[in-house]
Image (cartoon, coloured by chain):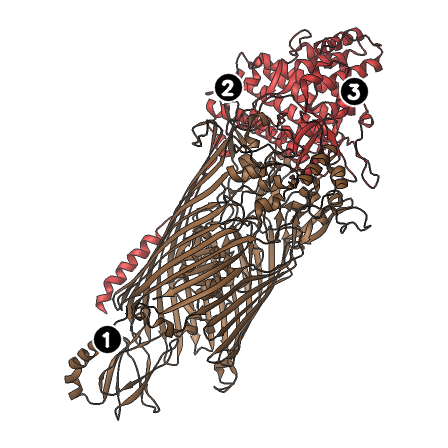
Chain colours: A red, B brown
Amino acid sequence: MKKHIYKIVLFAAVIGTFVSCEVEEFSDLNNPEVDAFENNLTRGDLQDLVGGLFYSSRVALGTYLDDCGVIGRDYYRFSGSDPRFTNDLLGGGTTMLDNNTFYITNPWAGRYRTVKNANLILGFLDGQDVSAQFSEAEVSATKGLLKTYIAHELLLNLNLTDENGIRTDVADEGNLGAFVSKTQALNDIQAILADAASDLAAGGSDFSFFFPSGFDGFDTPATFLQVTNAIAARVAIYRGDSASALSLLDNSFLELNGDLNTGLYYDFSEAGTDLINPIFISVAGSVPSNARVVHPSFLTDAEADDARVTNKTEPLPNGEITLDNLAGDTVLNLYQSNNDAIPLIRNEELILIYAEASITSNPANAVNALSIVRMAAGLPAYTGPTDAASLTTEMLKQRRYSLYGEGHRWIDVRRYGLLDTLPIDRVDTEGNPDDVWSSFPIPLTENQ
Amino acid sequence: MKQNNFRGRLSLLFLFMFPCFLFAQNVITGTVMTAEGTTMPFANVIEKGTSNGVTSDIDGKYSIEVANLPVVLEFSSLGFTTFEKSVARAGATNVVLEADAQALEEVVITGLATSIERTNSANAVASLTAEDIVGTTPPSTLDGALYGKFAGAIVNQNSGAPGGGLSVKLRGATSLQGNTQPLYIIDGVYVDNSSISAGLNAVSGAANGGSASNQDNPTNRIADINPEDIANIEILKGASAAAIYGSRAAAGVVIITTKRGKAGETKFRFSQATGWNEAINLQGTRDYTEERVLNTYGEAALADFIAARNNGTLVDYEDEIFGEKGFISNTNFSMSGGDAKSKFFAGVSHNNENGIVSNTGYEKTSLRLNLDHKPADWVKFNLSSNYIYSSSDRGFFNNDNTGTTIGIALTATRPWDQLFPNADGIYPDHPNNASNPLQTRDLVRNNETVNRFIVGGSMNLDVYKADNSSLEIILRGGLDSYAQKTRVIFPKELQFQKPANGGLNGVSVQGDTQNKNYNLSAFAVHNFTTANDINFRTQAGVTNEFFDRNTVLITASGLVASETNVDQAANTGVNQTRFIQEDSGFFAQEEVNIMDMFIATFGVRGDKSSNNGDANKLNYYPKASLATNLNEFGFWNEDGMWDQFKLRAAYGEAGNFPPSGALFTSYNAFSTDGVLGISLIGIRGDGDLKSERQKELEFGSDLEFFNGRLNFSGTYYIKTVDDLILQSALPPSSGYTSEFVNAGELQNKGIELSLSATPFSNDDFQWDFSVNWFKNKSEITRLDVEPFNIGAFGAGLGTFRIEEGKSATQIVGAYPEGLRVIGDGEPDFQMGFNNVFKYKQFDFSFLWQWKKGGDNINLTNLLTDLNGTSADFDDITLDPDGVIPNGQFRPNAPADVFVQDASYLRLREIGLYYTLPDRYLDGVIGGAVDSVKLGFSGNNLINIFDYNSYDPEVSNFGAGTIFTGVEVTPFPSSKRYMFHVAVNF
């Protein structure tokens, strides 16, 4: 058997090569890992991380706007591929809002994703010595921007769940704060914005990163501070704190006689890694299976010659379309392409906040502000009674038409306890009418 | 082609041997060989009718002294047919023993390098022969051949689109998040079975509503393998048999052996099958009346309806789209042959199959060359190589959120809608939907092209061989390399691409995947038999596997003119996905066979993998089994009816890797108006995540009576998956929607019974039948996280729900009082019933498959109801009060109306063949033609089900999940009719 010995040796050698093989360990081959930023955060890293906020703040924004627009009876969302826009959101038959369906889970998760993106950056900035890369002012400005984002995202979620509340303390993913009431949540948001404002005030002259074009005019710590204050003014009127609202507006970008569209915008584009405008459906492309159909009451309740009606909506060339026992002959025309920006907050809203905050303290200012908005829409100045109730009604009407399709009406009528004034369009075969929901349930996976 | 000089050679041999004859009278010598040309040690050589006998030595040589000449010698050996040879003169007589065809089937794999006779196996290993796979009717793809043929496999077609897309699940639910598809090994090569998405989501938006799963339904790559090349398939259904494959084996292992050459004359085979396929069960259109049109669609539509009806231009668009008969052609040519040293098998096949929707189809060309070479007694090389080109056009189907897929568009299409192009070829916009399905069908291209090369090689070395012991060394290597191109083109003239309609002005998505897997292994096998016939077989080896896949998907929109190149576009986005894994392990096993009475096996596999949290930690997977053949104990006399009575038990463990990316918490890159940014992927990874571990215990019995004419096998198994990996929901306010955790235990218990018999057999007529029946019950036996919903579109429409103590595939719906269980995806049982009749020159066979129970979530109904187009819209069968028509009842009803029984009974396969009698062939081409076979066959020709759509066999979410059976406007499945001719020469 000697002649076989060399074979055995060969085999032993082969075995040896195999066994000595160590298996290589790989990191994530496709994506940057979170841990990678916990040390040596560079200026380039910060740009990418902050850029993530601009992205994630737009995720499911269209769903948020549809939620508010459909329940607020601004418009119907006709969708052949998802019946829940016309069924659940309008409360058709006996249908209830579900706590585990995209209309609440997606926007809710999208907003908290942005909050987490921001909180992670705050953690990176606090968890390491970044003095070699950033000045103190730059760190402060960054924190101000991040906190403004956090506050705004929390506010949008609170707008959906309203009295059901939200979590405001979510910095530690392993130890989330409890759900807080609507009142407490608004107070917390107000406090975060105040904190953001003081950070921005100490933020020097420039941010250490650049912005998309929707930030034009608000891309320095000083000018972005005006946005922070504008959002804080919105929160203040939600809290019913007119005095704070007025003082915050003083330090915002409010211009009573300025361009109504000045403001901060969400940008969209058709670039592969970007998002397209989620609300845009062209008039010609509006069909029963895919359309945003103006609620008929928006047309019938309008004053004659209100330019906002003709600017923001467009009749369908072939007339009425129907789906799920709903009908309409006019569709939304707020945007002209997939690339159009959607306002986050703009001067027209600030003027109306100014009007609202002035109704009791200074009705003349309120009338003046309402007239500015009316005249911009081609309507005569306001000449009606100036008692608080009448001015409130007028203010709500102007908000309905000025901020149409921007997600405000549902929240506004809810703030004033007027949900029951919204129209009911359908009664099913068993006599169950549609419902007007006051709030979304807290998503199932919050385990509440 | 036949050798005619045999006699000449023989006389030469005799001349050469003549001197020996003079000196060694009445001693007959020679060598016993197998048909493969290897020498056969220990073959019995007996002088017939006497007790005079010898056995061949280690080199197959024998020498027997006989008293008188001529004499009849009887040659026999286990697993070979006994051969009688009349010998007139002393001297050399060489014989070749043919393998016993039945015995060949009865070897099952037990080790990475060894197999065992079925009669001694402790596992219920299913095996299929070439006859089982393609004998009745050729399947469209390899996995399609597994339907109904053995107990324990649930095969599900996800889409009827040509080119496959099947899932195979062995013994119930194996994993919730990890791989559920078996590992495929072909001639020792680990073969990739990925389904790579073509990026249709860029247009369909199917995943935008929160269902992150791939709804593109691409082909799974096992479809590339040509079923005609396969000699046999063995299916290791669970860990008790598959533990030797360690960390990748939890979902079972399918071991495929391809055809190889045999020593002897060169054999040629040509076969051609031609036929067509057509839809199984179209739904038809709603029975429209003026009143119904008016009520559903209003005045304008009524006018259109009346006008179209009066003009006779009402169109059944379902039939227009799905009513095609798709032409099928399969051509195969193979040749095989060789001599004692070298053998070959070469085959080429070309398949061409059109779908039931025009512009869909599947084309495949496969080349195979298998070589065996044995330069010396102690060494053997073999090589298997396979090149495949395949191309499939799969159309644009399934779920979407944009009203663009053909199926969704069809739900909104009414017979009076005018969708046909005008004389200039311009398609009108759909009046009622975002896309015109005829235009989409004619202009959209969704093509997958694959160039694939699979090569495996092995070397067997007999290091040592003696009478009672031997040592063999086996080295093996394999490579599976392919490039897949996906090309998706949505031209700008499509209704939903027109900028005026809000479209992207043309979309082109190009995907390129490079995949390279290779595996290396080395084993040593030692055999030792004691004097009292106790055999010890020891094997040990090491294995190493590498997997490397890189997919680049480029999505371009805003195409320039009619360009489709991705750079000729206004916007492009690129997505790259890499997957690299390296596994390394060892394996050792000991088998003890005590006189075929007790056969015990125990072994262990140790594996490490780069896909584990700790890459260099060895995970051990043990196995042990025991089989007892009671018939070997001598209780029954040799001539009794009992041939076998075996009791067996086997235990094994196997692993299942965490899904890719589960170990990491990462960001994804995006942009906002040109500003790059990274945002969290909403899934939190865990670096310490463990592989899932499956522990399977099976026991059963195999019985055989009447010389093998009646067989029964029964198996019961308990399969437990521990460290179940779950994507557990996190409160979304944490910034994450879910995290990967080891947090549960899943148990499957099942019974598998099979019976086969030959009730009748004589020279002219033979009838064989076999029946298999199996059921599986899964249960989540432990869940460390809150119960959660998974795998569909939310509780309002019916969803799967993972809950402790409940079935893993239970379906729940939302009701005012909370969630209610309204169904289960798991069938009550499945059954296959196969019959083969042979009468003279005719072969007739058919296979029925019955799936009893199991529910689907059918959302096609919902979509047609909302559009008023359901075929049963005006029937009143669902409303308990008998008032509201179905089409109005369903959308407002709770989820149980969408959860429907998906039972079916199908005539899966039927074939009738006629083999021309030899007397017609004698004169043809000088008698060179050996046989000619003609026939007809069909697939799914009879389908019985009470399911309200095209086919209960469907899965919107594709293959990689146990949550199949969700239906959203799929590509309807089809039946096939085929005509065959095959010539052997």
Mark 2 touches mark 3? (CB < 8 Å): no
Q: Is residue B745 visible?
A: yes
Instruction: Determine whether the residue tagged by mark 1 lies in a helix, strand or loop.
Output: helix
Residue B229 location, quadrant:
bottom left
Q: Could you tell me how many numbered marks the image carries? A: 3
Badge 1 and badge 2 in a common chain:
no
Chain-order first, disc 2 or disc 3: 2
Q: Chain of mark 3?
A: A
Residue A279 higher or lower than B645, as above or below: above
Q: Position of residue B335 (x, y in %)?
A: 33, 62
In the structure shown, which secondary structural element does the residue marked by tag 2 occupy?
loop
Task: Give amino acid for label 1.
Answer: Phe
Badge number at residue A301: 3
Q: Quadrant of the C terminus of chain B?
A: bottom left
Q: Nearer the viewer, residue B754 or B840?
A: B840
Kindly report the distance in space between the C-alpha atoms of the residues bearing marks 1 and 2: 89 Å
| Residue underneath mark 1 | B6
Residue displayed at 49% across by 87% down: B637
Amino acid identity at mark 2: Phe
Name the residue carrying label 2: A209
Give the label, 1 or 3, closer to the camera.
1
